Amino acid sequence: MESSEHVVSPPLYLDSDEGSGCSDAELSDQPEVEMESFSSKSLAVQAQKKLLGKMATRSVAGFLIDDAASDVLDELYRARKAFSHDRKASQKAVKDLVKVAVKLAVLARNGQFSTDELATAERFKRKLNQATLTAVSFHEVEFTFDRDVLARTLEDCREMLHRLIGHHLTEKSHARVDNVFRSFGDGEFLAALYGTEPAFQQHLAKICQGLNKLMEDGNI
């Protein structure tokens, strides 16, 4: 009888304090980057190059954040900056999201997840899809927005992601996950984003347009 045991490849070292990978400094956290020049896609390319330059494998060479995802992240950055009036913190939230996404893709493409972790990954994907559908629905159907519902769904995503990356990444990456969901899942921020102010309505429309594209392409 053939064994169903999942074979896990040797560990990859993705965080700077694990012996290899890309540190915050290496990803050029420049505090004076203007909003117009801040690009999540170029950051993803930079993060990937840093990882690939320090890893023996090249199996993640095809991983990039596509245009739709980049547009969503850039618009989230603009919305968060408009809400918090803190450009540096808003940039860090997006950078943390990109770093975690790149490292998660590296782990997945190199067979680092156990059978149980793959099941967790599937549950996380379904929950993220639910959060996306909820976010878009609240935008498209008037008077349906419930910030507690959306915030709770995002919190579920955060908890699942922590379980998924588990011991694979360091506490620094776990802290990045917390920062991402603290920034974009904050109830006050969500209330502003779905509010009546025209600037936030424009941000939300562009975010949901990108999310719809990602769902159509099967990327969420």
Image (tube, helix red, strand yellow):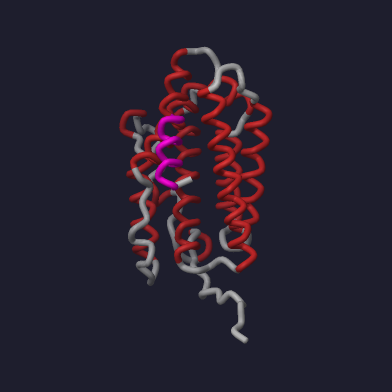
The quadrant the N terminus occupies is bottom right
The majority secondary structure of the magenta stretch comes to: helix
Image coordinates of residue 22 in percent, x first then y, are: 43, 56
Image coordinates of residue 134 in percent, x first then y, are: 58, 33
Q: Is residue 82 above or below residue 107?
A: above
Q: Nearer the viewer, residue 46 or 20?
A: 46
Q: Is residue 214 above or below residue 54?
A: above
Q: Nearer the viewer, residue 176 or 145?
A: 145
Range of magenta residues: 207-218
Taking the view exactly as shown, the residue that stands out farthest to the front is 1
User: In the image, is 145 to the left or to the right of 26?
Assistant: right
Image coordinates of residue 68 in percent, x first then y, are: 37, 39
Number of residue marks:
0
* Magenta-drawn stretch contains 174: no
Res 71 → quadrant: top left
State the residue at coordinates (36%, 62%): 52
Q: Nearer the viewer, residue 16 or 53?
A: 53
State the residue at coordinates (58%, 56%): 121
State the residue at coordinates (61%, 82%): 3
User: In the image, is 33 to the left or to the right of 81?
Assistant: left
* Magenta-drawn stretch contains 216: yes
Res 37 → quadrant: top left
State the residue at coordinates (46%, 31%): 76
User: In the image, is 42 to the left or to the right of 161?
Assistant: left
Image coordinates of residue 122 in percent, x first then y, are: 58, 55
Q: Is residue 29 above or below residue 170?
A: above
